Image (cartoon, helix red, strand yellow):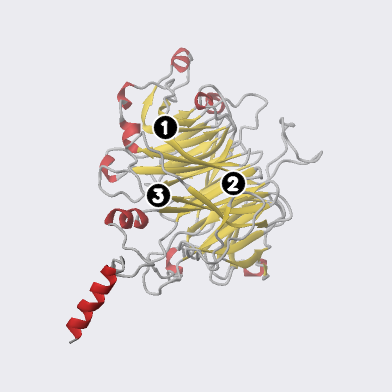
Amino acid sequence: MVKRKRDTEEQVLKANGIHKRDGPLTQPAQSPTSQIKSSTTTTIQIITGAYERVLHGVIAAIPAYDYSDAHTTPSVQFSDSFLFNAHSSSIRCLALSPKSSSVNAPQSQKIILASGGADEKVNLYHLSALSPPQQDVKVPSLPTLANTKVAENPRNRELGSLLHHSSSVSALYFPTRSKLLSAGEDNTIAVSRTRDWTVLSTIKLPIPKAVGRPSGDTAPPGGAPTGVNDFAVHPSMKLMISVGKGEKCMRLWNLVTGKKAGVLNFERGLLQSVGEGRWSRGEGRKLEWSSSGEEFTVGFERGAIAFGMDSKPKCRVLPTPTTKIHQLHYIAAAKLYEDSSGYLAVSTEDGRIIICSSSHTAISQNEASQVGSSIPDSLALGQLGGIDVGLVNRVKDFEVLRRDPVNESDSALIIVTGSSDGSIRLWALREAELHAKASQLTHTDTRQVGRLLATYQTPSRITCLKAFIMLGNHESLAEEGQSEDEFDGLEDGEDESNSSVNEQ
C-alpha cells in the first residue's frame, strides 16, 4: 500500500507539471572541480606598518590556478582584517613567530606578532593562523568608506607591550616560538621569553666614537650616531652578527655565553666596491643568513656583499643602474633544484626586486680594469617590477612565501611587496624561470621574470611588511609546547630586573 501511495503521489505531481528533484533544494551538490578549487585556495595574511603609526592587516585569497599558464590571471580577493593606531610614533619593524608543528589541540594554532616603533615600545599580538570564518550570507557586511571587504578574525587579540628599551626599536626577530630578540637605538639587544615576557639577558654594544660629521647624520652636536641597525641569528642558534650606526665593522656574538666573539672591519676597498664613498657612513644596514647557514649577506646603502663562513667576501650585489637597497632576503631552492644553494633577493629604491645567485658569479668589465678589486659580481637571474613595467616607487619591504607544490615540477613562489606609496603587490614566480638560460646571462642582464597577480592600495606610507600563508578552516593544529630547550644558550637568571611588561 505504501508503494501504491508513492506512485499515486508521483503521478499527481507529473500531472500538475511539477518534477520532483532528489536531494535538498537549498544546497546543490558541488562538482569535483569546484571542490578542488575551494580546497586549494591560498590565503595569505599580510601585516604592514606605516609612518602614520598604523598597523594594517590584509587577507589575500588567491584561487587555485595553473602558475605555468601565462594567459590566465587569478582574481585575488582582498579584505581588511584589522586597522588601528598601534604606536604613538612611526612603526619601524615587525616580526612573526614560527608556525607550530604540533597537532594535539584543535583550533589553537596562533602566531605571535611583534611591532616596534620610534616610541620605544614593542607591542605584542596573537594572530590566528586559521583563515577567518566565512561570513553568513544573511548577515549584512560592515559598512566601509572604501570599497573593501572586512573580514575580522575573532581569534586575534592583543597581549601587551614591552618597555625594556630606552630608545627607538630598530629590529625584531623570533628565532623560535619561545624567544624574542629585540634591538634598539640604545645600543642593546634584549632576549625575552615568550612564556612570561621576562627579559633573560641584554647584550650591550659599545658606543662608537664620533669621527667627523657624515652626511645625513642626525646626532646632536658633540654626539655620535648610535644604535643597532640590524642583527641576524645563525640557524644553529649559537651565533649572531650585528651591525650598528657609525661603525664600519660587523660584530660576531656567541649566544651560548652572551659575549662578543669577534669584530670584522670593513676595508676601504670593500666599501668602495659597493658604492660607499668618502662622505658615506660605511655602516652595514641589513643582515641575513642563508637557510643553510653557509653564508651571510651584509647590505649597505647602495649594494650588498655576501660572505662565507670564513668571513671572506664571495660576491657583491650592485644594482644596475645604481640605486639604494632597502631590504634583502635569502630564498631556499626547491628539492627539484638541489644543486642550487638558493637565491638572494634585494629590493631597491626604483621599485625592483632583483634576484641573484651567489653560487654563480661573473667578473664585471669595470672591476677587471681596476687594480686590487677582486670581488666578483653575483649573477642576476631576473627582476620583478622596475621602470620597464611602469613601477618606480621604492619597495621598502617584501616577503617571499612558498606555495605548497602539487608535484615536484610545480615550484611556485609568492612574493609580497610593500611600497612607500602604500601599494601592496602580489607576484607569482616559478623557479624554472630563474634557471632558464641562466648560463647565458651576464651581470648586466635585467630580464623580467614572474608576473603581477594583484595590487591592493592602502592609504599609508608602508615602512615594514610581514606575511604568512594561513591554514584552512578545516585544519586544526595545536600550539607548540614552548620548550626552553630550543634556545637555552642564555641563562634565565640574567638581567631579569630589566624587564618591564605593560599589560593592556
The earlier-in-sequence mark between 3 and 1 is 3
Indicate which disc, 3 or 2, sits on the residue closer to the N terminus. 3
Q: Estimate how packed mark 1 is, as few (under 14), some (14 to 19) or many (20 or more) residues with alpha carbons within 10 Å.
A: many
Closest to the camera, between mark 3 and mark 1, is: 3
Q: Residue at x 49, y 41 (%)?
A: 454
Location of the N terminus (image quadrant): bottom left
Q: Which residue is mark 3?
A: 63
Q: Nearer the viewer, residue 439 or 425?
A: 425
Q: Residue furthest top?
A: 369
* SS for callout 1: strand
> What mark, if any, has residue 440 been given in the picture?
none
Residue at 26% over, 42% down: 409
Using a 10 Å C-alpha cutoff, classify the residue at mark 3 as few (fewer than 14 neighbours), some (14 to 19) or many (20 or more): some
Q: Position of residue 374 (x, y in %)?
A: 44, 22
Task: Find disc 2 in the rendering and name its residue.
Answer: 464
Q: CA distance from mark 3 to mark 2?
A: 26 Å
Q: Residue 481 at x, y = what percent?
A: 43, 71
Secondary structure of residue under mark 3: loop
Q: Amino acid at mark 1?
A: Cys
Cα gap from disc 3 to disc 1, whole angstroms? 29 Å
Q: Residues within 10 Å of mark 2 (few under 14, many from 20)?
A: many
Identify which amino acid the numbered label 2 is placed on. Cys
The residue beneath circle 1 is 356
Q: Are marks 3 and 2 in contact (CB under 8 Å)?
A: no
The tag earlier along the polypeptide, 1 or 2, is: 1
Q: Nearer the viewer, mark 3 or mark 2?
A: 3
Q: Residue furthest right?
A: 221
